[in-house]
Image (tube, rainbow, N blue to C red):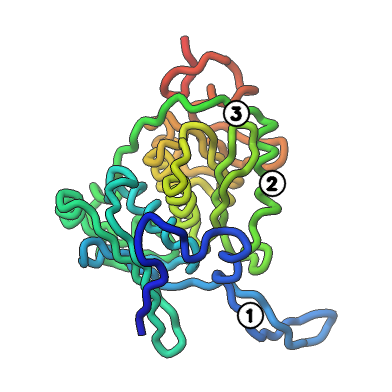
Amino acid sequence: MSQPSNKSFPGTAAVAGGEDAAAAGHVRLPVRAWRDGRLVVVEDSVAEETPVALVYNSEPHVVMMATPADLEDFALGFSCSEEVIGDAGELQSLEVFRHDNAGAASYEIRMRIPPQRHAALLGRRRNLQGRTGCGLCGAETIADAIRSPRRVGAGVPVSSAALRRAQDELRRRQPLNALTGATHAAAWAAPDGALQLVREDVGRHNALDKLIGALLREGRDTARGFALVTSRASYEMALKAAMAGIPLLAAISAPTAYAIRVAGEAGLTLIGFARGDSFVIYACPARVLDAGPRGLGADGTAAS
């Protein structure tokens, strides 16, 4: 059985962030837990992980495993960060269909894009399953997998106090992870660290794509703020941030060496181990007010 959960794009999301997304993103299951030296039966909140097929102009592109919430944001963010489209205006329509097969749900997101974009996509199409947001799964060639990033703009200066504020607020704004302990979050913060958007998913790439899609749907200026993620900063996290024009990406865990190289190429400020008052700047430090020179070049490096 298939039924559309959203009729057109742009429009209101079927499930959009916060408590509603948390409700859609988990199930309650009976489990056996060892507590106080004995086995007891309790109910546990378990994160949902659901196949989500992305279909462009009636052609299947990739199946990702994702949390079934904020799927409109996910589809738009993925389409832009993976260069399927050049900007949000090229996504001509979007419909989300839920399929129920013997009690197991899956989703199909049908999108229309310009013919020239679809032709380019067919030239580098992915046709394998993406495991929980693993963005390289299904890329058929090295050229498809390893893309050059866009250069990001100058952005805005960010202080260590703003980074700390964003972390503190994010800890309180992950309802799905609070229930399940199994999800990542990606957040958008104003220059002063005040959080404006948060998206959660079992996959770290998915959470960032959902955030990018939400930013685009709301028409926010991605140059005026920064992103914070509750995961490591892999190559694709840095690449997706750069493709969205985000000038600073902070992660609570470590980056990879490839992510650092991508950040340097893009002029992206990359921060790892953002925990409390401590953090490490791995690329383009000039956007961090406390880190040295106040002069800021157009690429986020120190102006001479």
Crowd tier of the residue under label 2, counting other residues whose Cα lies within 10 Å: few below 14, some 14–19, many 20 or above: some
SS state under label 2? helix
Q: Residue 148 in the image: state x and y as whole percent.
A: 30, 38
Give the camera-side residue of 118 and 296. 118
Which numbered disc, 2 or 3, marks the residue that appears first in the sequence? 3
Q: Are marks 1 and 2 in contact (CB under 8 Å)?
A: no
Query: Residue 109, position in %: x, y?
Result: 34, 66
Query: In the picture provided, is 118 more to the left or to the right than 166?
Result: left
Q: Is residue 234 visible?
A: no
Residue 260 image label:
none
State whether residue 280 is above or below residue 35: above
Residue type, label 3: Val
- The residue indicated by pointer 1 is 28
Question: Where is residue 297 shown, x and y percent of the image?
Answer: 45, 17
Q: Secondary structure at mark 3?
A: loop
- When the figure is inspected, residue 164 is found, relative to residue 210, above or below; the finding is above
In this picture, is 295 found above or below 46? above
Q: Secondary structure at mark 1?
A: strand
Residue at far top of view: 304
